[in-house]
Image: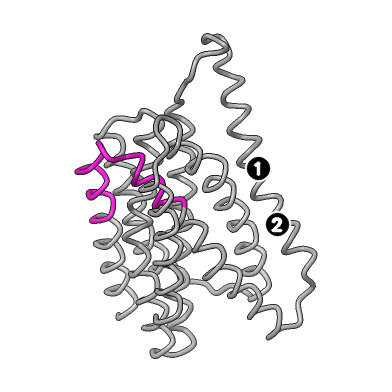
Amino acid sequence: MPQILLSIAAFISTYLGGLFVVRFKNKINLIMGFTAGVLLGVVCFEIFPEIISLIKEHDFETTPIMIALVAGFLLFHIFEKLLLIHHAHEDEYAAHKHPHVGSFSALALAGHSFLDGVGIGLAFQINEAVGILVALAVISHDFTDGMNTVALMLTHNNSDKKSKLFLLLDAIAPVLGAISTLFFSVSAHVLTIYLGFFAGFLLYIGATDILPEAHSSHSSYKTILLTVAGAALVFVISRFV
């Protein structure tokens, strides 16, 4: 089945992206800057255009989708801050990293990767040409998905071993997602709600978690340029894939 084979290519792309971060973790600030730009690009050049396209095609109401976006943003914000409050026995004014925050972020990205696989499978339900195009888009950005997963784990003081474990989970998720579509289908309306929710989540971790972390110890022109480069890369991918 072509959707399964292409989802395996997505697995490889994701895993290689994560290993890249492990290899160059001494440059984590620069990688985080690039990652923040990638997430911004994914929201603006991939997710929002897809939402707009579905709204136009099906004449959906925009309010539920925007509510889902705000809910995605606030849910992660609330979860992260409650987790930090739970660790309030630590020195109140010291700078801390909380591995559980990184793990939760990585799990959320794995959930997105699972739905990437679902997207591949559902596209093949339309026709093979659409399925191949969607799969190429997923494979193209999965390298940065793997980077995002490991960068989030490492920046919150998780070990290399645990980071690789979560990378493996993120990498296998699209394969499982593609397999799952052999047994079900989803409505376009449900898809728009999901996309809105996930856009809010990505905006939160990109703007309030990853980007500040990239500049936490040392701001530089390199970091700023890499953030711009990350967004530009996704723009190029979205135009040509």
Residue found at x 70% / y 49%:
71
Amino acid on which the number 1 mark rests in the picture: Leu
Neighbours of disc 2 within 10 Å: few (<14), some (14-19), many (20+): many
Q: Which residue is mark 1?
A: 75
Residue found at x 24% / y 34%:
161
Q: Quadrant of residue 219?
A: top left
| Region rendered in magenta | 16-36
Indicate left or right for 6 with 230 as reference. Answer: left
Judge by depth and name the residue closer to the eye, 122 or 133.
Answer: 133
Q: Looking at the picture, how far across and down is residue 142, in whole percent?
A: 35, 62
Judge by depth and name the residue closer to the eye, 201 or 124.
Answer: 201
Q: Which residue is mark 2?
A: 68
Q: Looking at the picture, how far across and down is residue 22, in whole percent?
A: 24, 42
From what the image shows, is residue 90 above or below residue 5?
above
Judge by depth and name the residue closer to the eye, 31 or 132.
Answer: 31
Neighbours of disc 1 within 10 Å: few (<14), some (14-19), many (20+): some
